[in-house]
Image (cartoon, rainbow, N blue to C red):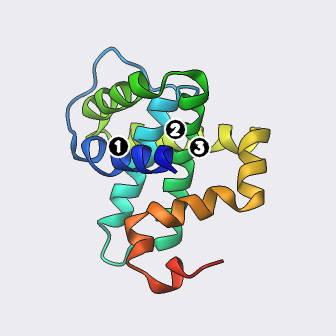
Amino acid sequence: MKIAYTITTLVLSGVVGACGTATAVTPDSTNPAHCVAAFAYGRSINAGAKVPDVALSVESTARALFEGKRMKVDGTFEAGGREGEEFYATYGKDGDAMLKLAYECGKRQDLDPNFRAMNDSGALMAAARKVDPLCQASQACRNHR
């Protein structure tokens, strides 16, 4: 569960709080660090809504956790965390680019047999429910089986 805690900390702290303007880095839906940043962006927009959608928050967290697992398997977890923070600092104020990237990352994940297996088994959402702050604030979400 350390990976879930670490990637969630990345998603909910440094990455979410960063800002900046676009530079030469191009959003890449095959780059797990870029996808973590994009899902963090979408999650932060949802969390700031008048009535946040808890299910959307948990799904964003689950998708970011999957990307974190990809970085762990690839041996790029530490460097990927830094790259995600830098990417968010670059694109964090470009909502159109971030939401487009989140959509593209989600489409890629939906076609990935490893993502589908983890998602279909319920393991991915269970891990996300354990660490997502909006879920933790909702008794119904916390108690979901």
- Label 1–label 3 contact, CB within 8 A: no
Residue for point 43% across, 44% down: 7
Q: Is residue 48 above or below residue 110?
A: below
Could you tell which of marks 1 and 3 lies nearer the N-terminus? Answer: 1
Which amino acid type is shown beneath numbered disc 3? Phe
Determine whether the residue tagged by mark 3 lies in a helix, strand or loop: helix
Could you tell which of marks 1 and 2 lies nearer the N-terminus? Answer: 1
Outermost residue toward the front in this view? 2
- Label 1–label 2 contact, CB within 8 A: yes
Q: Which mark is residue 10?
A: 1
Outermost residue toward the bottom in this view? 140
Residue 83 appears at what percent x and percent y? 36, 24
Of residues 81 and 44, the one drawn nearer to the viewer in this rendering: 81
> Disc 3 and disc 2: Cα gap in Å?
5 Å
- Residue 74 occupies which quadrant of the picture? top right
Q: Which residue is mark 3?
A: 66
Determine whether the residue tagged by mark 2 lies in a helix, strand or loop: helix
